[in-house]
Image (cartoon, rainbow, N blue to C red):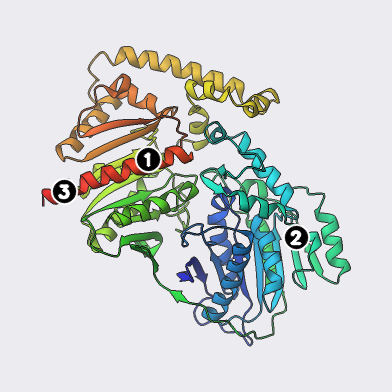
Amino acid sequence: MTPIFFEGRFGWLHLPPTGATTAAPPLGVVLCAAFAQEEMCTHYGLMILADRLAARGMPTLRFDYGGTGDSADGEVTLASLRADVVRAVACLRQESGAGAVALCGLRLGSAVAAAAAAEIEGVVGVAMLAPIVTGQAFLRETRAAASVSSLANLDPVPKLDSDRPLNTNGFLWSAALQRDIATIDLTAIPPPAPHMLLAPGRPDRKLPPFAASLRAQGTAVTEVPFVDYDAYMQDPTTHEVPAATFAAVETWLAALPHAETVAAAPVSVAPVLTLDGCEEIPLRFGSGNAVFGMLCRPTGHAAPVAALLLHEGSSHHIGDGRAYVALARRLAQAGIASLRMDLTGMGDSPAGANMRSPYFDPERLTEVFAGIDLLERHGYPKVVAFGLCSGADAAWNAGLADERVVGIFIINLQKFLWNYGDDLRVIARNSKRTLRSYARSMRNPAEWRRALSGKGDLLGIARVLAKRGLSQGFHAVKGLMPPAPGSEPAIVREQLRMLAARDVETLLIFSDEDPGLGEMGRHFGRNARRLKPPARVVTMTRADHHFNGRDVRRRYQAMIETAMADLVARHRADG
């Protein structure tokens, strides 16, 4: 697969194996992604699907809509999404020689694909995975899920007639976009293509009449169950690639008629995205070039210290709500380069034959070192390692092992010492929010409705909080004595002494309700009073675990820009 920028949009071109020949122009496939958090959940899977289709001789393009992912910033509207699909088809034809094309859309992407098909010549089929037939139903579902999330305590779901954006896991849906989505009604448009595949993820009373209407108008409709939908539409730490449904999609696409040749409209293609004050370069590196990263560097003079951005398990290299895209471009404006990267098995870095979980995996530290090597080759000999949660673990361990790391700026580190193989589901269950967080949630009516309906794990919450209280009391007493040699507290304190001896600036950032604060307290006392410079702890008030709230994200980025500027100035002065 080859990274590509076309008219400010970032994409991946998956071409058939070298030497593969066909008697006619091949059928091309454009994958139209889901939106916001649903795209994060399904991103890795669409890479696998694109590889499968290319292996069957179908050149395939997957891409980020404008204003999303690694694409250029901009307002997202229904019209812009449709226009991006049109651009993507033109790019695929230009770069691969494909003639007829099929569109394959997932969730909101299915509705966008169906609407865009009318504007594209030579669309022979549209596959709609977990399709959205009416935008109003989709919007109700999205807003309802947002209203019971912990983020709703920080960014309440606005009323439909409000001009305020909806925040879902850090992704902002403008009021205009919500109004746009509410107008979607696929039953009111002509058949998008002569062949349609419908793979419903869940029962939808609108779907049977939609399928019947398509058939009545002469469309060949194939219906297959999306049997593995629920396992796929999960947080990336636990989701499963829907192999059965993807096999059905692959078989259907391969059987589509595609003899015609369609001229490709010219599209501007570039290997680099040039933005105001910076440029972004997609790079493959590491063993077998399996690791992907996006280098963001200033167009002018750059500091010798760069940022290495390691994401958490629930996202890929763009970060939740594009947090790392925004941070990277902001740092570049200040003259600081960065690399945001995916470990293998995450985002755009395929796992290959490696069946180990990529989360908290010490063996994947070699990939982090490969990222540091890449930055050094591009002229950045010193690095500040960033990370959140599992990414914080990778950044912490990279900083301990590699002397090129001069700073460790991490958010919500859960444990200093991690035992690989611990079940992530058990960890999640034992990492319930703090008592302060639950007290804050009591002011949210949606949380009360969720608890009283039986959907809240009240017994689990009580059990974990009681266990945590006993543990904190035990460690408070134990902390009055020097740690035993070889014990976890002794090891952690020695790690901090080693970093201090190297003058590594260590910034441990926590949301005020994160259970990781308990880990700090166990090792360094209440309010981390035993922690010594150059290490320091910053607690962010009114902050969720992922820093998805709009206010805390603004405060965090401003703090990081200042901290990076100070660190760069110090290292410039030191030569």
Label 1 to label 2: alpha-carbon separation: 43 Å
| Label 3 sits on residue | 571
Residue 44 in the image: x percent, y percent?
53, 56
Residue 390 in the image: x percent, y percent?
41, 41
Q: Residues within 10 Å of mark 1 (few under 14, many from 20)?
A: some
- Disc number lying in front (3 or 2): 3
Q: Amino acid at mark 2?
A: Leu
| Label 2 sits on residue | 198
Label 3 to label 1: alpha-carbon separation: 22 Å
- Disc number lying in front (1 or 2): 1
Label 3 to label 2: alpha-carbon separation: 58 Å
Q: Residue at x 58, y 82 (%)?
A: 264
Residue 426 in the image: x percent, y percent?
51, 32
| Label 1 sits on residue | 556
Labelled disc at residue 124: none
Q: Amino acid at mark 3?
A: His
Q: Earlier in the sequence, mark 3 or mark 2?
A: 2
Q: Earlier in the sequence, mark 3 or mark 1?
A: 1
Q: Secondary structure at mark 1?
A: helix
Q: Residues within 10 Å of mark 2 (few under 14, many from 20)?
A: many
